[in-house]
Amino acid sequence: MTSGAELTGLQEAATLWSVGSAPATDVIDAACACLAAGADTPTLRILAGVSPVKGSESDELRRWLPGALTELSQAYYRVGSREGEEEALRVMARRLLAKSITPRDLTSWASGFITYDGTPLAMELIDLENTYDYLDAVYEWRPYTSTVAEDVDTKVIVEARRLLGDATTAVVG
């Protein structure tokens, strides 16, 4: 059977796709990776075979993705759902803590894909993105001459840990 990495990859791609943050091709590629790693369910085969032709792939994903994820005992988040937004925030928070994205990447992502109209869980990150924007304006897009941006980075890391339920939020490292 497939390793956890492939299943996690499919779950994350599907979750990010549900909030408009990842293209359908990421989900299709992740489905192919699951098949290559040994997962083999009828709907996963169909999902992996979805044509990545721009325009129709999202309709096909909406049709086949719920069944494929259910067959693999993975969660499905409806496009635009509050649950999907909250899980996408956790996916991105894990990426920050794994150092695959920067604190600014996380706040910019939250501001762009969740927005103030989305889940209240994103509000602190969006406010911190506004803080980064303010700093950029104050420093006129030149490198910061103080540690103020590092302080904002620390707040973003603390918020990411809070989103993940990490009790070590006081320790940043």
Image (cartoon, helix red, strand yellow):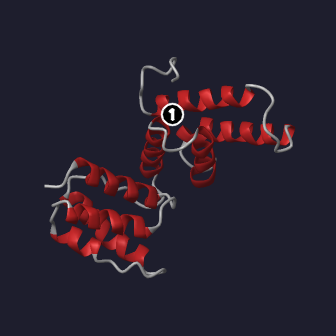
Is 70 on the left-hand or right-hand side of 169? left
Left or right of residue 60, residue 116 in this image:
right
Amino acid under disc 1: Ala
Q: Position of residue 108 (x, y in %)?
A: 63, 47
Q: Secondary structure at mark 1?
A: helix
- Picture residue at 52% right of the left edge, 17% below the top: 170
Q: Which residue is mark 1?
A: 160
Whether residue 73 appears in this view of the structure is yes
**Above or below 51: residue 119:** above
Rendered position, 137 above or below 76: above
Q: Quadrant of residue 62?
A: bottom left
Q: How many marks?
A: 1
**Residue 93, position in %: x, y?**
48, 39
Q: Residue at x 51, y 61 (%)?
A: 20
Q: Which residue corresponds to the image point at 31% horizontal and 50% vertical from the top-left?
A: 8
Q: Residue extending furthest top?
A: 170
Quadrant assignment for the N terminus: bottom left
Q: Horizontally, is 65 left or right of 142 in the view?
A: left
* Residue 117 in view, yes or no: no
Residue depicted at x 24% and y 48%: 4
Is residue 84 or residue 134 the one in the foreground? Answer: 134
33 to the left or right of 164? left
x and y percentages locating residue 44 in the rendered image: 22, 68
Label 1 neighbourhood size at 10 Å, few (<14), some (14-19), many (20+)?
A: many
Tell me which corner region of the image, top left, top right, bottom left or bottom right, holds residue 124. top right
